[in-house]
Structures are given as C-alpha cells and as structure tokens.
Image: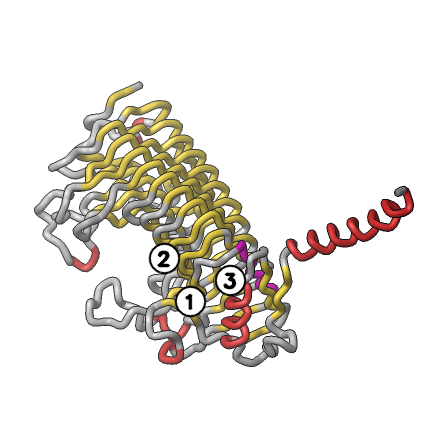
Amino acid sequence: MGLKLKNVLPMFVFLLLASTAKAQSAALDVTSAKYGGKPGSDITQALEKAWTDACASTTPSKIVVPKGIFKFVGTTFKGPCKAAIEFQLQGTLQAPVDGSQLPKDDTWIGFDHVDGLTLSGGGTFDGQGAQSWKNNDCNKNRQCKSKHINLRFHVLTNSKILDVTSKDSKNFHVNLQKCEKVEINGFTVSAPKESMNTDGIHIGRSTGINITATTIVTGDDCISIGDGTKDLTVTNVTCGPGHGIAIGSLGRYPEEEPVSGINIKKCTLTDTTNGVRIKTWPASPIDSTASDIHFEDITMVNVGNPILIDQEYCPWNECKKGVPSKVKISNVSFKNIKGTCTDPVAVKLACSPGLPCENVELSDIDLKYTGDKGPITSVCSNVKPTITRVAQPLACATGAAAA
C-alpha cells in the first residue's frame, strides 16, 4: 500500500501543477508564427485573430504586442468573452494618417461589452492626428464628418487601464460610455495644445470609474464628464496644457441623465484655459440635475478661470441665451484650491436664474492673479455660497453666506 501511494503522489502533483499552469494566463503573441504579425507592417488581422482566440478561451488569456512599431488600421474588439483578458501593449500601434483608411465609424480602437479587461504594458496608441486637427470642427459644424477617437470603451466592466499612453488622437483620446467599475491608473495622454477637440478622457453614463496617477497634456478638456456619470473619483491627475477638468457640458440634448457623486482631489493644473468647472447650456430641452460634486486640494499654475460654474455656456452662439438652463446644480464644494491665475476673475459662479444653485461651498481658496488687467475678483449670480477662509475679493461678496 505504501509503494502504491509513493508512485501515485508524484503523478498527482504533476497533474495539479499542469492544471494550475493551464489556468494561468496564456500568452498570445501577435508576432508568433500562429498570428504572423511583424514590426513595421499592418497587424490588424493578427490582433483580431488573437482576440478571437482569447475571447473564446475559458481560462484567462494575455494578448501581447511586443516592443516595436506596428501599423493598425483599427477595429472594435467585441465581447462578451468567456474569461478575463489582458491586452499587453509593449510597443506602439500607429493609426493611418489618412482617416479614410480607418473604420467607417468614429472609433480607431474599441472594446465593446467586455468584462475583466486589463489594458497594460507601457506601450503607446498613436493616432497620428496632426493633419486632422485643423479640419476637426465638429463642435461647431454640424455637417462635418466626425474624426476618430483613439480608444472607445463601451459597456466595459470590472476592468483596468494601466500604464499605457494615448498619443495624438484625431479626436477624443478616450471615451467611456456605459462602463462600470473601471480603474485608470498611470495613464498618459500626449498631444500639443493646438490639437482641436482632443479631450483626454471623456466619461458618460458610467458608474464607479476611478482615475488616478494620470498625466494629461492635450488641446481640450483633460477630463470631461458627461451626463449620466455617477460615483467618479479623480485623484493625483496632472493636467495641462488643455482646457482643465469639466463637468459637462450638460443640458444640450433631450434624454440626458443626472450627474452625481463626482470627487476631484489632489490634482495639479498648469497653463490651462480653465481650472475646475461645471458648464450647462441655456434653454435646456429637459429638467436635469448635477449634484454632490466636490473639488478639493487642487493646485493651479497660471490657469485661466480657476473656479467656474457657467450655466450660460453657449459657444458659437448655438443657443437661446435668454432662456435659463434647466440643469439644477446643488451640493457643490470647492475646497483648498490654491495657486496662480491668468484671468482677474478667479471665481465665477454664474448659476441659472430659473434654477439657482443650492448648497455651494467655497473654503480655503487662495489664488493670486499674475496679470495686469486689474485686481483679482469674483463674480457670482443666482447663488448664495457658504464662505470659509476666503479673502474678500474671492468671496462672492454679493449674496454670500459666511460660515
């Protein structure tokens, strides 16, 4: 009996180790003989085949794009998949310069209905968008053809985006729609300030998104937060140049959903046209709300409009300015915001005359104006903010309630 156990035990251990190894992530290298990808060439088909295999696997898989520069025409990687997938980009994927060679929709690389994705590897998604920016006027020309977004995540759940870079997107760098429980950590957005409509990260109708330790250099909003966003946390983000961090714009379209539970903390904004702001359109087609929004421990370095609520947001005169916004803003705080600004109006709270802002708090605001267009000041309307430890010029003297 002892002899039989002695012979059986090594076999049992072998089978156990083999089973464990099989359960671990299988590496699917797009340059392997099976997939045939080569640096300098188009690896669209190789990546699509690797994704098909990974998505069909019942155990976790890892897709690897090794170091090197690879051409990629673009596609949307679709789920649902049978197990978690790590997409490890170590090299650089380059989009075609000519947008006509990209997919027919406005997405270069998409992930759709995927649960348990990890996007990692330290590599770069290069949208090669420089030629597109001068023609990217979709924000004011309704007849335009929308440019391509570098990375679109639609119905992405329980996922991580770690230590990768989006470079020179033709349009937004990242767009998250209908996503839930997504962590973005160590992410980088890189584009010159001249790049048009290149929001760094846009979030809409998503819940439980966490953005941290991220650097965004771009030509538009570093982070833009659209309707339906709930429970968003942004910490330790470096922004600039760009247009700052924005809630909105909201209230432009019918069927927009409320925004709530937004926490922006420990961020630094440098050379941005705006700081932290909430913007809504006049003449909103429906009633909506934006509530429980908190900005705290923010450093401003040569920032225009550091603190801004703008419920008269109307670029290119595409609205009825005389009709109040129907977006109700409430429970908003601006705490411990310090630094320098390039506009003498350092605090502007322009709330809706139809639905005045409620429960707005300003505390520990210390901003210095570096220009020569008069003294630093604040302008506030249709709001009675609570003021704590804020110097008189920044304290919304008209209608303010001292704490």
Residue furthest out toward the front:
1
Figure check: 271 above or below 263 = below
| 3 or 2: tag closer to the N-terminus | 3
Q: Is residue 108 left or right of residue 69?
A: left
Instruction: Name which quarter of the figure residue 92 lies in.
Output: bottom right
Q: Amino acid at mark 2?
A: Asp
Q: Position of residue 215 (x, y in %)?
A: 50, 52
Residues under labels 3 and 2: Cα distance?
A: 35 Å
Q: Which residue is mark 2?
A: 220
Secondary structure under tag 1 reads: strand
Q: Residue at x 45, y 40 (%)?
A: 299
Is residue 110 on the magenta stretch?
Answer: no
Left or right, 161 with respect to 169, comes to right
| Image quadrant containing the N terminus | top right
The first of marks 1 and 2 along the sequence is: 1
- Amino acid type of disc 1? Thr
Q: Which residue is mark 3?
A: 55
User: In terms of depth relative to the viewer, which is nearer, 296 or 340?
Assistant: 296
| Mark toward the start of the polypeptide (3 vs 1) | 3
Mark 1: few, some, or many residues within 10 Å (few <14, many ≥20)?
some
- Can I make out residue 270 in this image? no
Quadrant housing residue 305:
top left
- Magenta residues, start to end: 83-90
The answer to which of 366 and 61 lies nearer the viewer is 61
What mark, if any, has residue 76 been given in the picture?
1
Find residue 13 and report its horizontal and vertical position in percent. 79, 49
Q: Amino acid at mark 3?
A: Cys
In the picture, the disc for residue 8 is none
How much space separates mark 1 and mark 2, taking CA atoms?
Answer: 25 Å
Label 3 crowd bin: few (<14), some (14–19), many (20+), radius 10 Å:
many
Q: Quadrant of residue 130?
A: bottom left
Side of 51 where 360 appears, left or right: left
